[in-house]
Image (cartoon, rainbow, N blue to C red):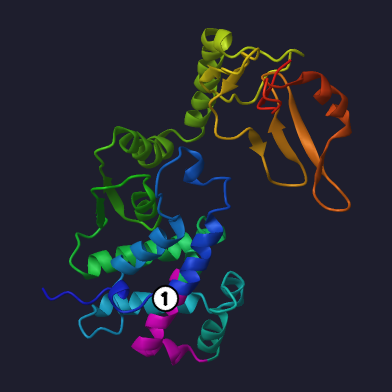
Amino acid sequence: MNYPKRLIEVDLPIKRISAHARREKSIRHGHISTLHIWWARRPLASCRAITCAALWPDPADPLCPLAFRDKARKLMLEWTTHEHQELLSAESRPRFEAARQNPTKFDDAEELRRALLDFIADFSNWDNSTKKEYLDTSRALTQSAHEALGGEPGSKPLVIDPFAGGGSIPLEALRVGADAFASDLNPVAVLLNKVVLEYIPKFGQRLAHEVRKWGKWIKEQAEKELAEFYPKGSDGATPIAYLWARTITCEGPNCGIEIPLIRSLWLAKKGSRLYVLLSESYVIWLEPRRSGGWKFSTAYKARLKNIQRYCSFGKRIWVQK
């Protein structure tokens, strides 16, 4: 059987997909990136788009099965209704509005291709990734393409990712109605994919409850075993972070203070205040001057004088209580 070109081999609305992928970096709620940090995680937006474009044939290709072309035309015409057009972007709406006024517009195979590409661009939007209308249409197109290209009726196409990493491609394959097989040499990646592709669909909210329950237990046990290595501050407060460094003793005459081998004492340099470490026990912040520059916060100015230490050469190199 001679296979037609897929949409991804012909065209792809890269600019619009990229915009959604960039926006996705700031999304946290419900995103798999919150499950576990993974290096070079592929954006779900682009993975969703390329998965659809790789599974669906180009309706303008002479070898495209008529069954898929008819199904795609029917589904795209459903998006010409006012209710569906409200879910479309401003870039896509004019094409579907024109088809609503003239339903024969999508009889043109190239115009049908453009409609499918518009649908893919809008579906790559995170806000649309769980909307029933987008999911139903994408899954119907995936199933139609699979069966029209010789797939067993009732079965699903299989998307294989041998280097699955964070699991973006297998996850999006499941979303658009395909089966997925994922593998990776890294056992952390294998666990991530099993959770995303198997455990969450199977156990749902029950899994979330168990993760919170046992995560709390691990935290409590770790605090008991590690508390002695992370002492509380002099005021009894629990520090949120520690700076660890080796120290050397100053060889200056009559000095002998310990000097930490640390690159920088700055804790933060962003926002309206700057935080700097003055000793093992004190952290102060700097406030902006009206005339420009920075000054010590008045709350800690008096304390600063009492904790400074100078080496015998007269140059302050470290501070201690």
Secondary structure of the residue carrying numbered label 1: helix
Identify the residue at horizontal 56%, vertical 60% (top origin): 23
Residue linked to disc 1: 117
262 vs 98: above or below: above
Residue 219 is left or right of residue 313, and the answer is: left
The magenta stretch spans which residues?
102-120
Q: Name which quarter of the figure residue 107 lies in.
A: bottom left
| Quadrant of the snapshot with the C terminus | top right
Residue 23 appears in view: yes
223 vs 140: above or below: above
Q: Name which quarter of the figure residue 72 lies in.
A: bottom left
Q: Nearer the viewer, residue 280 or 190?
A: 280
Residue 15 among those drawn in magenta: no
The location of residue 297, given as percent across then percent down, is: 84, 35
Identify the residue at horizontal 65%, vertical 35% (top origin): 267
Residue 214 is left or right of residue 315, and the answer is: left
Q: Nearer the viewer, residue 11 or 310?
A: 310
The location of residue 12, given as percent across then percent down, is: 38, 75
Type of the residue with mark 1: Leu
Residue 119 among those drawn in magenta: yes
Which residue reaches farthest left?
1
What is the total number of numbered labels drawn onto the structure image? 1
Q: What secondary structure is the magenta-colored segment mainly?
A: helix
- For label 1, count other residues whose C-alpha is less than 10 Å away and answer few (under 14), some (14-19) or many (20+): many
Q: Nearer the viewer, residue 213 or 190?
A: 190
The location of residue 124, given as percent across then percent down, is: 47, 64
Identify the residue at horizontal 29%, vertical 33% (top origin): 187
| Quadrant of the snapshot with the N terminus | bottom left
Residue 119 appears in view: no
